[in-house]
């Protein structure tokens, strides 16, 4: 009888699920569940009664967990093991070094095994991505219509895409404008231009990079059939954080232009800067300026300026406003030096981009 009772108790003990993680707050409240992750600002706890609960990290007084947790420290260490609280510090019971005490102020992250696998998979993808991976960007469109005694249609289309890894970055852009009007049954195309290009950046260090560019431009009403510009040089990450980036570039370029009546080639200096800033979680500003002094025809130059403001409406839709200025100091006879394009409309985003 005694042996049967012991067997039953053993079975009950084995059938009892592992004790849930316990969180004690500074006000004495206790929560139980499964610790998912923490970024030292908030802690995510999965519960059976309220799905996931987000707790401010500063309010956490004690953390007790029987599951192995991955704990990152300011010193760059990652400590793995069940976690408890002792003498105001977190104690991690590691297999290799025994119990390691970590001050709460030194903790940079906490993750369970599932979250750690996700992070490592993301790191691996950044380090060894395929060319089709990691693209983010947006497709922009703008449309203007006039109907009545006269008719006009204005349409603009743009595509911006970025593929960034820890080693390099590919930036692609294209923008186009088309306008047509009808007055007294006379139909005329009044604007038709398209610009596009790609830039490849290779990081040499945290602050420096090498780059190569290819830009193409067509403008029917400047009599420009095609401008092809190949450039290369070096750059400096002057500012690089989550809200703001500023890159400075210097190099050289070769410009080949095919106009309706003549062709010409030029060697150029390439000077430029690109800037992005997130004002809010849903609003971002972008700006890029490039200046090309002509070495083959001293005193002449080109410049390109682009400005953009994007406000996120939904996860995939944003409202965008863009401005582009293409300047050529020595256009064909009778043609103007500036081509301006102002567009506003919807942006369809893809990847993780919201800017």
Image: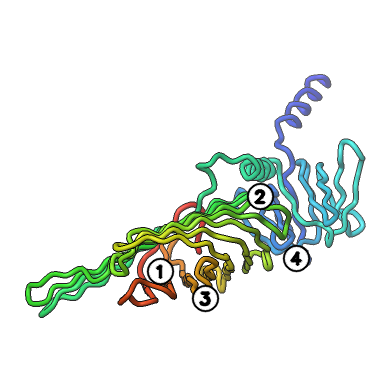
How crowded pointer 1 is (Cα within 10 Å; few <14, some 14-19, many 20+) is rated as some
In the displayed structure image, the side of residue 109 where residue 49 appears, left or right: left
Q: Measure the C-alpha gap from mark 2 to mark 3.
A: 40 Å
How crowded pointer 3 is (Cα within 10 Å; few <14, some 14-19, many 20+) is rated as few
Give the quadrant of the N terminus.
top right
Instruction: Using the image, tell me which numbered label, if any, was put on residue 166.
Output: 2
Mark 1: secondary structure: strand
Spot occupied by residue 111 in the image (x, y as percentages of width and height): 72, 48
Q: Earlier in the sequence, mark 4 or mark 3?
A: 4
Circle 4 or circle 3, nearest the eye? 3
Instruction: Using the image, tell me which numbered label, if any, was put on residue 147.
Output: none
Circle 2 or circle 3, nearest the eye? 3
Mark 2: secondary structure: loop
Spot occupied by residue 246 in the image (x, y as percentages of width and height): 63, 68
Q: Earlier in the sequence, mark 2 or mark 4?
A: 4
- The residue singled out by tag 3 in the image is 299
- The residue singled out by tag 4 in the image is 59
Q: Measure the C-alpha gap from mark 2 to mark 1.
A: 30 Å
Q: Is mark 2 in CB contact (under 8 Å) with mark 4?
A: no
Circle 2 or circle 4, nearest the eye? 2
């Amino acid at each position: 009888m005694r042996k049967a009772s012991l067997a039953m108790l053993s079975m009950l003990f084995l059938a009892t699920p592992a004790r849930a993680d316990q969180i004690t707050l500074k006000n004495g409240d206790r929560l139980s569940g499964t610790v998912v992750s923490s970024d030292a600002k908030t802690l995510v706890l999965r519960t059976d009664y309220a799905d996931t609960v987000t707790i401010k990290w500063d309010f956490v007084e004690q953390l007790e967990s029987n599951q192995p947790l991955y704990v990152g420290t300011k010193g760059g260490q990652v400590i793995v093991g069940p976690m408890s609280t002792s003498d105001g510090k977190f104690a991690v019971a590691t297999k290799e070094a025994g119990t390691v005490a970590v001050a709460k102020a030194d903790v940079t992250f906490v993750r369970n095994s599932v979250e750690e696998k996700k992070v490592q998979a993301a790191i691996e993808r950044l380090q060894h991505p395929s060319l089709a991976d990691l693209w983010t960007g947006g497709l922009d469109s703008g449309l203007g219509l006039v109907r009545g005694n006269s008719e006009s249609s204005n349409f603009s289309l743009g595509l911006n895409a970025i593929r960034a890894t820890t080693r390099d970055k590919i930036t692609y852009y294209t923008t186009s404008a088309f306008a047509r009007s009808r007055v007294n049954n006379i139909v005329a195309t009044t604007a038709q231009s398209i610009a596009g290009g790609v830039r490849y950046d290779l990081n040499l260090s945290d602050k420096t990079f090498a780059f190569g560019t290819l830009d193409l431009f067509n403008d029917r009403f400047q009599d420009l059939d095609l401008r092809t510009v190949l450039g290369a040089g070096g750059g400096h990450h002057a500012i690089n954080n989550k809200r703001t980036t500023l890159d400075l570039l210097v190099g050289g370029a070769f410009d080949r232009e095919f106009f309706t009546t003549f062709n010409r080639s030029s060697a150029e200096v390439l000077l430029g800067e690109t800037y992005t800033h997130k004002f809010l979680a849903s609003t971002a500003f972008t700006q890029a300026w490039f200046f090309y002094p002509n070495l083959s025809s001293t005193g002449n130059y080109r410049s390109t300026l682009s400005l953009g403001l994007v406000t996120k409406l939904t996860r995939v839709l944003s409202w965008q406003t863009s401005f582009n200025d293409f300047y050529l100091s020595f256009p064909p006879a009778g043609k103007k030096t500036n081509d301006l394009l102002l567009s506003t409309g919807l942006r369809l985003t893809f990847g993780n981009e919201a800017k």
